[in-house]
Amino acid sequence: EAQVTQNPRYLITVTGKKLTVTCSQNMNHEYMSWYRQDPGLGLRQIYYSMNVEVTDKGDVPEGYKVSRKEKRNFPLILESPSPNQTSLYFCASSPTGVVYGYTFGSGTRLTVV
Amino acid sequence: GENVEQHPSTLSVQEGDSAVIKCTYSDSASNYFPWYKQELGKRPQLIIDIRSNVGEKKDQRIAVTLNKTAKHFSLHITETQPEDSAVYFCAAKRGGITGTASKLTFGTGTRLQVTL
């Protein structure tokens, strides 16, 4: 089954404790992206990747890092989480070169206390 | 960059009535406009999309219209049912092989409630 898999689904952590949210897709998509969803603000792009070893900032990259060592994986790293990073996070992927929508992961609800 | 505005932010309709959600976009190079439905606690899921060479597209009770000149597009749901209750997001994209062209810019969402 074609899918984007995110883990964990829920995470509660303390300020400053490094964490990683994993994302993996099995559709051989070149493009992968991370979004955060906050009430009244919709979905805002954090980082994206056009292909292996190619990443770039989205609209709200501060406090986040990503890597793309393999085509299928695109982890989101919070080196020193803060309470304002409490949010719902979605990983998404799509092919490039064609006009096509995203396939989203199931989401990670992160709470930083 | 692209900016997508979506209205209304909340919409309450009675079962069987129609619902209309409107979006405007700023980048005239955008040529792909998907709509996503997000049920409570779930991921956004694509329900319908339209490309810039088409003015209207229908899929059963759902339709989307696009006015490229005015840079706005709308989602129409007819004969609404309780299971249509969700948050709906519009989005816009240029399409292409660059990072900017591949980005989907989302509206802020419309919470639709269908009451009995």
Image (cartoon, coloured by chain):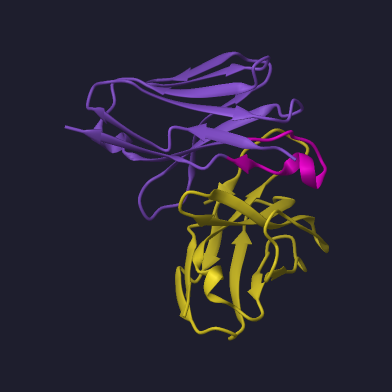
Colour seen for chain B = purple
- Indicate whether A113 appears above or below A9: below
Estimate the x, y position of residue B51 in percent, counting from the top left: 65, 23
Q: Residue at x 27, y 21 (%)?
A: B17
Q: Which residue is drawn at 56% across and 69% down?
A: A85
Give the magenta-colored segment's residue range. Answer: B92-106
- Indicate whether B17 appears above or below B32: above
Q: Look at the image and say whether residue A61 sits in the magenta stretch.
A: no
Estimate the x, y position of residue B9 in percent, counting from the top left: 42, 38
Chain drawn yellow, letter?
A
Q: Look at the image and say whether residue B97 sits in the magenta stretch.
A: yes
Estimate the x, y position of residue B90 in percent, counting from the top left: 54, 35
Q: Which residue is drawn at 65% across and 21% down?
A: B71
> A83 or B101, which is in the foreground?
A83
Q: Which residue is drawn at 47% across and 80% down?
A: A113
**Residue B56 horizontal side relative to residue B15, left or right:** right
- Indicate whether B63 appears above or below B43: above
Estimate the x, y position of residue A8 in percent, counting from the top left: 49, 71
**Residue B9 horizontal side relative to residue A36, left or right:** left
- The answer to which quarter of the image holds residue A48 is bottom right
